[in-house]
Image (tube, helix red, strand yellow):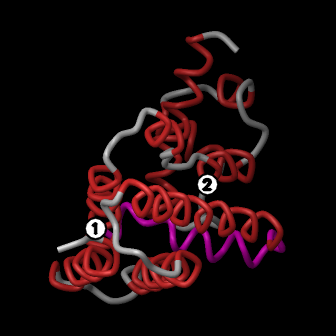
Amino acid sequence: MGKKAEKTREHIRKEAYLLFADKGFKEVTMTDICEKTGLSRGGLYRHYSNTSEIFLEILSQEYTIASRMEKRESAKVILEEMLAAIKCEIMDKELSLSLAIYEFANLGNEEFFIRINENAKRRWLSLINYGMESGEFKKTDGERTADLILYYYQGLRMWSRVIPFGEDIAENYVETVRELLLKN
């Protein structure tokens, strides 16, 4: 795929993300995405055949930390950047895909979400192990800690769509994760 095509696909995903966050999955149409991106129907269909394909690609994009660990970046720096992104998502429900994810999951996409969840857990577990090996994180049961961090976040993310959270709630999450992982 050429650079221009990848740039167009990136633009489509970015604008579709905002639509999915605003309307949920069920309400977004290819026409909505055409209008939001400024692409013609043919231009959009050249890259994606339907909203499911776009949504799946958005969800498959992961915050990649493996390459950063290979470069021996600080586990604490990686953690702080992840926590900052999570805090923003909790605080700004307009950026949350929780409603769209819930709707999409109810369409029978369980296997995909099992895979997404396993990848998220694996990402947290690899960071926890990396941080313990580098001496930046406390020694802990990585599996249990990864579960706690992941499901605490997912619960906050889902609830942030239906009730307003103050910054204190997001900050409590960040502080709890820091207390679980970081040495004094």
Q: Nearer the viewer, mark 2 or mark 1?
A: 1
Q: Is residue 43 left or right of residue 66?
A: right
The stretch in magenta equals 92-109
Question: Of helix, strand and loop, which one carries label 1?
Answer: helix
Tell me what residue is drawn at x 29 percent, y 53 percent.
81
Q: Is residue 100 magenta?
A: yes
Q: Is residue 45 magenta?
A: no
Q: Which mark is residue 134?
A: none
User: On the image, which quarter does residue 90 sit in?
Assistant: bottom left
Question: Of helix, strand and loop, which one carries label 2?
Answer: helix
Viewport quadrant of the N terminus: top right
Tell me what residue is drawn at x 19 percent, y 77 percent.
171
* Place of residue 82 in the rendered image (x, y in percent of width and height, measured from the top left): 35, 57
Query: Please, is residue 151 above or below residue 114 in the view?
Result: below
Residue beneath label 1, please? 87
Q: Nearer the viewer, residue 52 or 27?
A: 52
Q: Nearer the viewer, residue 147 or 104?
A: 147
* Place of residue 183 in the rendered image (x, y in percent of width and height, measured from the top left): 24, 71
Residue beneath label 2, please? 59
Between the residue at mark 2 and the residue at mark 1, the CA separation in whole angstroms equals 18 Å
Q: Please name the amino acid that badge 2 sits on.
A: Leu
Tell me what residue is drawn at x 36 percent, y 81 percent.
160
Chain-order first, disc 2 or disc 1: 2
Label 1: few (<14), some or many (≥20) within 10 Å? many
* Place of residue 36 in the rendered image (x, y in percent of width and height, measured from the top left): 47, 40
Report the number of numbered marks: 2
Q: Main secondary structure of the magenta part?
A: helix
Label 2: few (<14), some or many (≥20) within 10 Å? some
Query: Please, is residue 59 above or below residue 92 in the view?
Result: above
User: On the image, which quarter does residue 5 sit in?
Assistant: top right
Viewport quadrant of the C terminus: bottom left
Tell me what residue is drawn at x 44 percent, y 84 percent.
152
